[in-house]
Amino acid sequence: MPVVTIEQLGEIVRDVFDDEVAEITEETTARDVEGWDSLNHIRFMVTVEQRFNVRFTSREVESLHNVGDLLKALNSKSPS
């Protein structure tokens, strides 16, 4: 699987949260993005899983504290 980049995740954030100017960093958390509530978190994770053809367990999702954690997790997974 090719390396997932912060730019790719930024595109997903802008799409899911309908925010064309949202900029994210590896330190970005849900609190930093307007409208990132529990429902949109699910939408975001489903979109990430679909876009990169991976699956996360509930435990894995709970361990993700910021975008950097998600990048590391994505780049360590093989497509499912």
Image: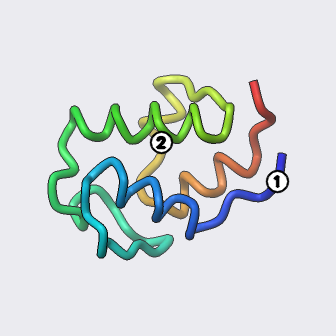
Q: Position of residue 60 (x, y in %)?
A: 54, 33
On screen, residue 36 above or below 59: below
Whether residue 70 is situated above or below residue 77 in the rendered picture: below
The numbered dot on residue 71 is none
* Residue 19 at x, y percent in the picture: 25, 63
Secondary structure under the numbered disc 2 in the rendered image:
loop
Q: Residue at x 46, y 64 (%)?
A: 10
Residue 52 spot, x, y in % from top left: 66, 40
At a point 15% along the width and 53% down the height, the residue shown is 35
Q: Which residue corresponds to mark 1?
A: 2
Q: Residues within 10 Å of mark 1 (few under 14, many from 20)?
A: few
Q: Residue type at mark 1?
A: Pro
Residue type marked 2: Ser
**Where does the C terminus fall, quadrant-wise?**
top right
What residue do we see at 82% from left, 53% from top? 2
Secondary structure beneath disc 1?
loop
Q: Position of residue 27 (x, y in %)?
A: 43, 72
User: Does residue 19 appear left or right of residue 50 in this picture?
Assistant: left
72 versus 78 height, above or below: below
Asked which colour scheme the image uses, the reply is rainbow
Is 1 on the left or on the right of 72, as rendered?
A: right
Q: Quadrant of residue 20?
A: bottom left
Q: Residues within 10 Å of mark 2 (few under 14, many from 20)?
A: few
Q: Quadrant of the N terminus?
A: top right
Depth check: give the residue in front, 56 or 49.
49
The image quadrant that residue 45 belongs to is: top left
Q: Which residue is mark 2?
A: 63
Asked whether, in this view, residue 37 is left or right of residue 78, the answer is left
Q: Residue at x 65, y 65 (%)?
A: 5
